[in-house]
Image: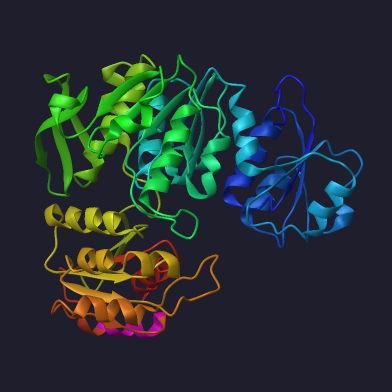
Amino acid sequence: MFTIDFNTPIHIHFIGIGGISMSGLAHILREKNFTISGSDSAHSALTDELTAAGCTVHYPQAAANITDDIDLVVYTAAIHPDNPELCAAKDANIPCITRAELLGALMDNYDVALNIAGTHGKTTTTSMVTEILLAADADPTISVGGILNSIGGNIRIGQSKIFVTEACEYTNSFLSFKPTMNIILNVEEDHLDFFKDLDDIRHSFKLFTEKLPDNGTLIVNSDIEHYEYFYQDKNCEVITVGSEPAKSMYSATDITYNENGCCEYTLLIEGTPSEKIQLSVPGLHNVYNSLAAIAAARKLDISFENIIAGLKHFTGTNRRFEKKGTFNGVTVIDDYAHHPDEIRATLTSTTHYPHREVWCVFQPHTYTRTKALLPEFAAALSQADHIVLADIYAARETDNLGISSQTLQAEIEKSGKHCDYFPSFEEIENFLKKNCMNGDLLITMGAGDVYKIGESLVKS
């Protein structure tokens, strides 16, 4: 594994530097006086920011961009083995590592490397931890998977020895990390284009836990079935959070909802009532995200005063139950949910949110996920009063596996629930304009570009 030492800056070249994660890592290293170059297919706001920060960015990718003074090349999983820059770097015997490996190498430079993992809730929980640390003036370095307004993006470069990041299990990327503290929020079936089944996913999370040193800390949701499996062979400290006080060090009671569906609860520590916690993001699932954030903060000796202030200040990140505006008296929300459990949690949140009827415009994400979880998607979406489907967002996939949004439509309608499908966003928008009524709640949902529908309606 390549070593990154903040005390010995080198020249690092990023292939695909314009990606949100790659650009963030480039900014961190540039701030630490590393020489940064990179390439991308075209100019973007992110690459322009990198240039303004003193990085050299080439367009497009070409072998000539690999110069003799480059000490290390970083690339993402999206870069093909025949990429001209990657081939040129290997021909020149320049060390080449993945983005995940670089992230792991960065962690060696921090006393606290907090990795937040789980099938769902990573971005929200990372953002909650961020707000708590900011309230405490802890000056952390943060890498979050969404846009958090309080840090002006997805990266914050601090001067303390605390580093907080999301840890994604896809392609086992989090196994390249070097954590001191791990959070496991939940473990469900997902990314089945890479993992074989749930047991394979659980094994990956167990390996993730094994990355902790013996003096490290694991914070784990005790609601996960057989949660002890993840740490049964480790000597690290284990802190449990969850819905059952009998098996959770941190749990919640007296949960109530305000007029916007946000929860207030009494924090229980080992079953004993402690502080009153007020959240500013809706949904019961966020109570359990906040418990994990509280557990991490307490381990870092953050006061309850700052924990309470940070959680109350957190109003969400982009694409997580984000209010986009209104049209014709209809409230428009956008949400990143793209897994049945996430859909269920988001639609359950609407129970306590002002609305007449709930419309869900869902864009399935990847053929693999849609096919593997078809009945689960149908059941989760059926919570909405009205369901509208867009075409599947293929993302990285090229094989449709013989499945389409019409397949999901048929699965939903098998139970007697009506579902509409339209092949274009324009048709969906026209349908919604005609059928949504004053007081309705419209949620555009999915990990693709379905948010454009809501944005267009709000502007109309």
Quadrant for the C terminus in the image? bottom left
The answer to whether residue 254 is above or below residue 379 is above
The answer to whether one can see residue 86 in this image is: yes
Quadrant for the N terminus in the image? top right
Does the magenta portion include 431? yes
Pick the front one: 446 or 194 = 194
Residue 460 falls left or right of residue 349? right
Residue at image position (41%, 21%) is 234
Residue 312: image location, x then y, percent: 26, 33
The answer to whether residue 287 is above or below residue 317 is above
Residue 39: image location, x then y, percent: 75, 53
Q: How many marks?
A: 0
Pick the front one: 364 or 222 = 222
Boundaries of the magenta span: 425-433
The answer to whether residue 276 is above or below residue 168 is above
Residue at image position (15%, 30%) is 252
- Quadrant in which residue 360 is drawn: bottom left
- Quadrant in which residue 303 is drawn: top left
Residue at image position (13%, 79%) is 416
Residue 418: image location, x then y, percent: 18, 81
